[in-house]
Amino acid sequence: MRPYETMVIFDTGADEAAVNGVLDRALDALSANGGRTGRVERWGRRTLAYEIQHKREGYYVVIEFSADPPAVVEMERVLVLADEALRHKVVRVPDEIAGRRVASASDKGS
């Protein structure tokens, strides 16, 4: 399995229940295909660098996970079909950086 990170920008006009529903469907699609979810960070409302679909603000969520490529494709499919998601970007995290993240997180717990 490979480490990935995804940033999703949701429409601020969507209710919180709808945003949570899209996140749940995306994470369920990921786990149903053998992926493992790590941290899910909700950054909240932020001003966009440029307008997307005539919107000036978005609700940002960052998801860290490990999965095989077919699971990533399925999660992306869910995000593309969701009207609440304005944009998303999936990035494969290099193994060296992912290893450092795991090591630094375990060092803090000691």
Image (tube, grey):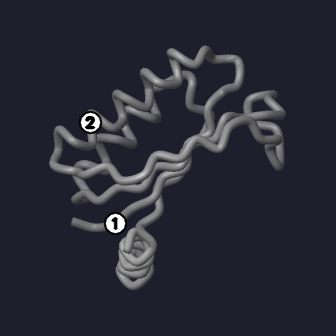
At horizontal 25% and vertical 57% (from top left) the residue drawn is: 67
Mark 1 Cα shell of 10 Å, populated few (<14), some (14-19), many (≥20): many
| Amino acid on which disc 2 is placed | Ala
Confirm whether residue 76 shows in the render.
yes
Element class at badge 2? helix
Query: Given the image, on which type of amino acid does mark 1 rest?
Result: Pro
Q: Disc 1 marks which residue?
A: 3
N-terminal of the two: label 1 or label 2?
A: 1
Residue farthest toward the front in the current orientation of the protein? 110
Q: Quadrant of the C terminus?
A: bottom left
- Give how far across and how far down residue 48 sits, in percent: 79, 43
Mark 2: few, some, or many residues within 10 Å (few <14, many ≥20)?
many
**Splitting the image into 4 quarters, where does residue 28 fall?**
top left
- Kindly report the distance in space between the C-alpha atoms of the residues bearing marks 1 and 2: 16 Å
Q: Measuring from the top left, give residue 73's x and y in whole percent.
A: 31, 47
Which is more toward the observer, 99 or 86? 99
Q: Position of residue 106 (x, y in %)?
A: 36, 72
Q: Quadrant of residue 64?
A: bottom left
Tag 1 secondary structure: strand
* Above or below, comparing residue 63 to residue 87 in the picture: below
Residue 94 in sight from this viewpoint? no
Quarter the N terminus occupies: bottom left
Q: Which residue is mark 2?
A: 29
